[in-house]
Image (tube, helix red, strand yellow):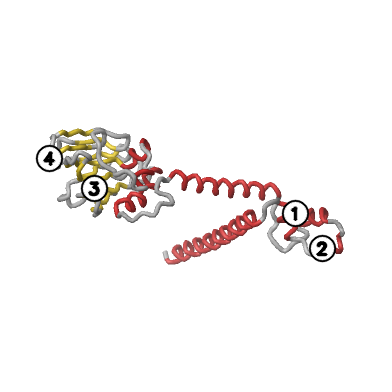
Amino acid sequence: MVFGECRELSYSHDNATKNNMEDETVGATDNIVTEFSTYEDFLDSQITPLDLYYLEDEELARQLVELGYRGSGEVLKREEFEARKQAAEASRLSKRSQQKTLASFGKELKDPFLKALAQREEANRSGKMTSIIFIRDKNSRGQEISGYIDYAHRLKIEDFEPYFSGRKRLLPRPSDLSFYNWETQTATSNPTPNYQVIAENASGLLFKNKRDRKVLNVDPKAPSPGDNSARVPLESPKYVQLVIYDHITRRKT
């Protein structure tokens, strides 16, 4: 039994060492493709003045480096260099595109609520998280309203740049998950692509996630909002009451 455990440990150690070496090799190669603009520049970096003195032919020196007969660095074929160059460029463009799609990107946010929304924006856009925002405040008519907003859904159907810039204030609407006007006593509830509303329930208002079918309980007296969920109360001088319910979405297996 002990022998078996030692053998497993030794195997794991060998694999870990091998993986570390592979990671270092890939890392070194990635550095090469970002450091040199062209494959010729990479080959030239491997050629010494002494090589040129004896060979008297720069193109021949490059060929010898490519074949591994000259040069002190890693042997890298043209096809592999070009492939890694394209992969590095694709990764750079992907990061740049992601930064552009985030409405909060580049904004200097001071309000705690806007900071909290910015921290959750990428996760809600990508589907890793589906946050529900509870807001209680007054509308432009001075009427007290409250409601629950599906943040991920609103991000898809609305431009949030004016909110993060401070030009607009995020408020619940009759088209959101849940809405209530305390003066007119108007109440509405609507399903979204992410949540189903369970209004008539002994436990109060519930939201069922359509992706993993987990139920989110927004009752502040509940011991927990539910599996993979967290209740985060916030304070902002711009709102009467704020709570964000974060739900980490996991597909049903």
Left or right side of 11 for 120: left
What amino acid does circle 4 point to?
A: Ala
Q: Quadrant of the N terminus?
A: bottom left
Mark with earlier residue (1, 3): 1
Query: How far is the residue under mark 4 from the one under mark 3?
Result: 16 Å
Which residue occupies 43% across, 52% down?
Answer: 106
Residue under numbered circle 1: 66
Of residues 235 and 11, the one drawn nearer to the viewer in this rendering: 235
Q: Are marks 1 and 3 in contact (CB under 8 Å)?
A: no
Which label was assigned to residue 202?
4
Q: Secondary structure at mark 3?
A: loop
Query: How far is the residue under mark 2 from the one under mark 1?
Result: 14 Å
Mark with earlier residue (4, 2): 2
Mark with earlier residue (4, 3): 4
What x and y, as percent, mark residue 172? 25, 40
Which label was assigned to residue 51?
2
Residue under numbered circle 3: 226
What x and y, as percent, mark residue 91? 54, 48
What amino acid does circle 3 point to?
A: Gly
